Image (cartoon, rainbow, N blue to C red):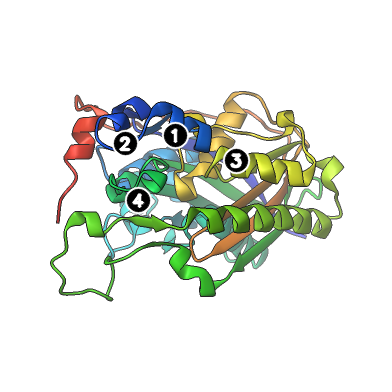
């Protein structure tokens, strides 16, 4: 049976840091308040657009897999912050990396978008439609921060991560099981209003086009659904919690991560956490974390890895993966974002106001 396996990985985190101390200067908050409630110390703020970050991450993943961009059959970009509504962010990324033989598609499942992308890639490979697929999670969420709302305005950051998924006949590796879920009855718990056809003629201030979240309800649902998804994909793969070598959860809040790990009875060494450095980068959190786990040699051949995420929609999902034999990149890319001399606060202030 043809399986899908991860053969390449890469990330792009903007060079400019927006620290908690920076945010203290522009909103009613403090480093202690932010860190104790979320685990976040800083996040990155991008001076370029979502497609630029996505392109860099994709190039690193393609190089790690030892492929040429022309080898790619399909390119998915999971994002809720595309450069434009038309064309897709994926089409823009395709042009920037030269993957001219690939089909392109965006998908918006908010923070669960990367797992939705993995599912789509796995399905195409299992059906024989594609052999090599790139899945990118990329977000520029700082564009929608509400600096008057300290419970949400401190949580989000920018970045991108990517993987290459390839077909394999090896029964001892690859994506073993997946679960996707959604409950549209809870759309208003996490949303950005005034951004689509609901308000086509409104001349609204930028502050009205910002992230709104009911944090307590999101927390409760996230812990339950991520824990359930992890258990379900392990059961579907014929595994149990004792088989998990590393959990890579969506990096939304360290309290959610800790509660999910406790629900799964995992010790800290079995859970990858990097939220302190990046905040919540939505669809980008898992591929960024996976890339850093590979760089830190936290993943070995044959390890069982579980991805779980929860996001707006409300959406959730899980993936169980048995890692293949290779844990180092075949090649490296020199792709990088252009430099900037602006500070985090300067970039924050430069956001459009209407």
**Comparing labels 3 and 2, the label whose residue is closer to the camera:** 3
Count neighbours of disc 2 (C-alpha within 10 A) and say few if under 14, some if 14 to 19, many if 20 or more: many
Query: Which label was assigned to residue 290?
Result: none
In this rendering, would 61 be left or right of 229?
A: left
Q: Are marks 3 and 1 in contact (CB under 8 Å)?
A: no
Q: CA distance from mark 1 to mark 4?
A: 34 Å
In front here: 152 or 88? Answer: 152
**Comparing labels 2 and 1, the label whose residue is closer to the camera:** 1
Task: Determine whether the residue tagged by mark 3 lies in a helix, strand or loop.
Answer: helix
The vertical placement of 317 against 44, above or below, is: below
Count neighbours of disc 4 (C-alpha within 10 A) and say few if under 14, some if 14 to 19, many if 20 or more: many
Which corner quadrant holds the N terminus?
A: bottom right
Residue denoted by label 1: 34
Residue denoted by label 2: 45
Query: Which label was assigned to residue 255?
Result: 3
Query: Which label was assigned to residue 93?
Result: 4
């Amino acid at each position: 049976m043809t399986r899908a396996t991860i053969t390449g990985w890469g990330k792009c985190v903007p060079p400019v840091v927006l620290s908690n101390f920076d945010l203290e200067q522009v909103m009613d908050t403090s480093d202690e308040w932010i860190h104790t409630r979320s685990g976040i110390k800083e996040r990155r703020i991008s001076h370029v657009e979502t497609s630029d970050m996505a392109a860099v991450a994709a190039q690193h993943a393609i190089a790690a897999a030892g492929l040429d961009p022309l080898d790619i059959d399909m390119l998915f970009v999971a994002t809720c912050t595309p450069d434009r509504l038309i064309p897709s962010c994926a089409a823009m990324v395709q042009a920037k990396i030269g993957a001219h033989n690939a089909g392109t598609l965006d998908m918006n499942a908010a923070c669960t978008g990367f797992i939705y992308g993995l599912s789509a890639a796995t399905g195409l490979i299992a059906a024989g439609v594609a052999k090599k697929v790139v899945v990118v999670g990329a977000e520029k969420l700082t564009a929608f921060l509400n600096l008057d709302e300290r419970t949400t305005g401190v949580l989000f950051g920018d970045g991108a991560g990517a993987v290459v998924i390839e077909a394999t006949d090896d029964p001892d590796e690859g994506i073993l099981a997946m679960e996707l879920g959604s409950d549209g009855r809870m759309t208003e718990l996490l949303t950005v209003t005034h951004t689509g056809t609901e308000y086509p003629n409104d001349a609204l201030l930028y502050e009205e086009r910002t992230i709104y979240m009911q944090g307590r309800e999101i927390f409760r649902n996230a812990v339950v659904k991520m824990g359930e998804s992890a258990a379900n994909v392990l059961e579907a793969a014929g595994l149990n919690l004792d088989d998990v070598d590393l959990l890579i959860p969506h990096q939304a809040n360290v309290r959610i991560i800790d509660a999910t790990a406790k629900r799964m009875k995992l010790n800290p060494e079995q859970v990858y956490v990097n939220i302190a450095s990046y905040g919540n980068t939505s669809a980008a959190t898992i591929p960024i974390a996976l890339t850093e786990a590979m760089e830190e040699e936290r993943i070995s051949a044959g390890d069982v890895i579980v991805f779980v995420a929860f996001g707006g929609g409300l959406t959730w999902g899980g993936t169980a993966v048995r890692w293949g034999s290779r844990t180092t990149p075949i090649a490296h890319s020199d792709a990088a974002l252009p430099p900037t001399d602006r500070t985090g606060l300067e970039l924050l202030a430069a956001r459009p106001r209407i």
